[in-house]
Image (tube, rainbow, N blue to C red):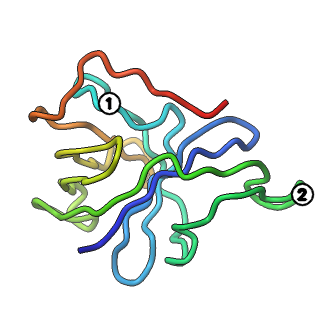
Amino acid sequence: MPYFVVHEHHARQLHFDFRLERDGVLKSWAIPKGPSMNPNDKRLAIMVEDHDLEYGSFEGVIPEGEYGAGEVYIWDSGEYETVKGSIEEGQWEFRLKGQKLKGKFVLIKTKAKPDQWLLIKKKDEYADYNFVLKTRA
């Protein structure tokens, strides 16, 4: 089963990097406000370049002067499975099996810009309408 990882990234601005293993790489989205377990939250997710699979286990400091400089922590990780759809279709529903993120989610491509998506928690037994995102800092 493929895996996912969410990096808490303390760069110029705190954001979360959501990564799904697919076709031998990590498909990646930057999520400024972080993922949510609340189905009412529609989180902007900016699709960024693919990352090597090895990056999934990275934690540490990206040095000043390099792209993405700052501290990186693994916020959550686990396995996932596609429920329906795909990146190519512009709507990809999947089930996450992580420590913090569980159940069904969907990534929906917006019409605003080619790299803009929304990450939305689906209503299921894991939905948490009182979800509060907790960070390391």
Residue visible at 77% across and 59% down?
67
In the displayed structure, would residue 101 be above or below residue 41? Answer: below
User: Outermost residue, right direction?
Assistant: 65
Along the viewing direction, whichever of 108 and 14 lies nearer the viewer: 14
Amino acid type at image mark 2: Gly
Residue picked out by circle 1: 42
Q: In the figure, residue 57 lies in which quadrant?
A: bottom right
State how far apart marks 1 and 2 are (Cα). Answer: 32 Å
Q: Is residue 135 above or below residue 115?
A: above
* Horizontal arrangement in the rendering, residue 51 relative to residue 4 (left or right): right
Query: Percent x, y for residue 127?
Result: 19, 30
Residue tagged 2: 65
Residue 126: percent from the left, percent from the top? 17, 34
Q: Which mark is residue 101?
A: none
- Looking at the image, residue 123 sits to the left or right of residue 36; the answer is left
Q: Is residue 54 above or below residue 48?
A: below
Q: What residue lies at 26% left-to-right and 68% top-to-bottom?
A: 88
Is 135 in front, or is 27? 135
Residue type at numbered disc 1: Lys
Residue 96, position in %: x, y?
A: 25, 53
Give left or right: position of 125 versus 64: left
Picture quadrant of residue 58 = bottom right
For the residue pair 109 and 38, the one nearer the viewer reads as 38
Rendered location of residue 114, percent (x, y): 42, 54
SS at badge 2? loop
